[in-house]
Image: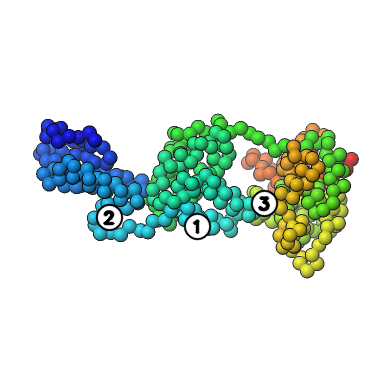
Amino acid sequence: MKLTVKKIQSITKAGSYGDGRNLWLVVGSTGLKRWEFRYTLNGRPRQMGLGSLDLMKLNEARDKAVELRRMVQNGEDPIDARKGQKPPPSQTFEEVAEKCVTSLETGWSNPKQERQWRSSLASYVYPVIGKRSVTLITTADVFDILQPIWSTKSETANRVRMRIEKVLDFASALKLRSGENPARWKGNLDALLPKITKVKVVRHHPALPYAETAQFVAALREKEGIAPRALEFTILTAARTNEALGARWSEFDFDNATWTIPAHRMKAQREHRVPLSKAAIALLQTLPRDTESEDGFVFISPRSKNKPLSNMAMLKTLKLMKRQDLTVHGFRSTFRDWAAETTRYQDIVVEMALAHTVGNAVEAAYRRGDLFEKRSRLMNDWAEFCES
């Protein structure tokens, strides 16, 4: 509280004099003194006149400011309330986030993305702002969520920030809030947090040295069950885990030795043709198949024939083989290292085999096809190496 009765009486110069906590004394050019309540709601600064000093003494103005400040904290606009306008019903961040996640579901390539969204929001965001009105979220709130994990879990923190930003954009589109997005990075959080590239520690997926591949595959073939076969197929095709586990029989053309993965299951959202080596085809032909469904999963969950195998099953296989030092995704690095160090295949052929997006615009324009014939020879060479 900066103002006193004595100080107010001594002020003669026109201007605004803050008492603190949103309360201001405004002195006009004629010497008239009045009270003003200043606040920001939904990113919009507002000023509300409370009356002249003659009608409202200092203590009364302070009491009124407390009342109005409580309204603002609850997401209610004092000016609108005085005009008799009803504010739109407020929704909590958690309520809006659940609607946002639901609206995004149809655009995701696999259910894992939904689980990651819900898990990260529940773990890091909801405990801080989940029950708060979406209209009241500030940059300081977002900073409080991100700052503890920005350096220790940088990749997770960056994803959390982008998800908060998406939810708040969703709320703005529904007219549930207005103003700037407090989770925006440029010109906002970048002033409070270092760039993610400055703190991010790059962790590569543990990969098997390619010289040990044949020995590993031989040991893997001694294991019985659907999970070891799924892992072997993933290695032979250099596919991503979700691409392999989500495979359906309808995607395979054995006459042309081709596995066509539809765009909605690919990371780059583009259809991908995988040349099948003789070893991969032989493996597939040993698997049980539901004759009642032409579109059934290839690697069926032991719990339900209508569900694919869980990726935890392949990790369990690695554990049973006492290879917890490896990850399934790491075998793609093994394949990449083998191709780079022991073959003469061009990088573009190997990148296409891994279904990587070609970054160079000139190279992308030059390579109009998918290099299927070259990739077919590459995958057969890889299969032979895995059995050597």
In the drawing, what numbered circle is on residue 266? 3
- Count of numbered labels shown in the rendering: 3
Q: Is residue 373 visible?
A: no
Q: Amino acid at mark 1?
A: Lys
Scheme by which the image is coloured: rainbow
Residue occupying image coordinates x 64% and y 40%: 359
Task: Work out whether mark 1 precedes mark 2 in sequence or the reverse, and give the earlier one.
Answer: 2
Residue occupying image coordinates x 47% and y 55%: 96
The residue at which mark 1 appears reads as 99
Q: Quadrant of the N terminus?
A: top left
In the drawing, what numbered circle is on residue 80? 2
In front: label 2 or label 3:
2
Q: Amino acid at mark 3?
A: Met
Residue occupying image coordinates x 78% and y 51%: 227
> How far across and down, in percent of the image, does residue 171 sit?
44, 53
Task: Work out whether mark 3 precedes mark 1 in sequence or the reverse, and give the earlier one.
Answer: 1
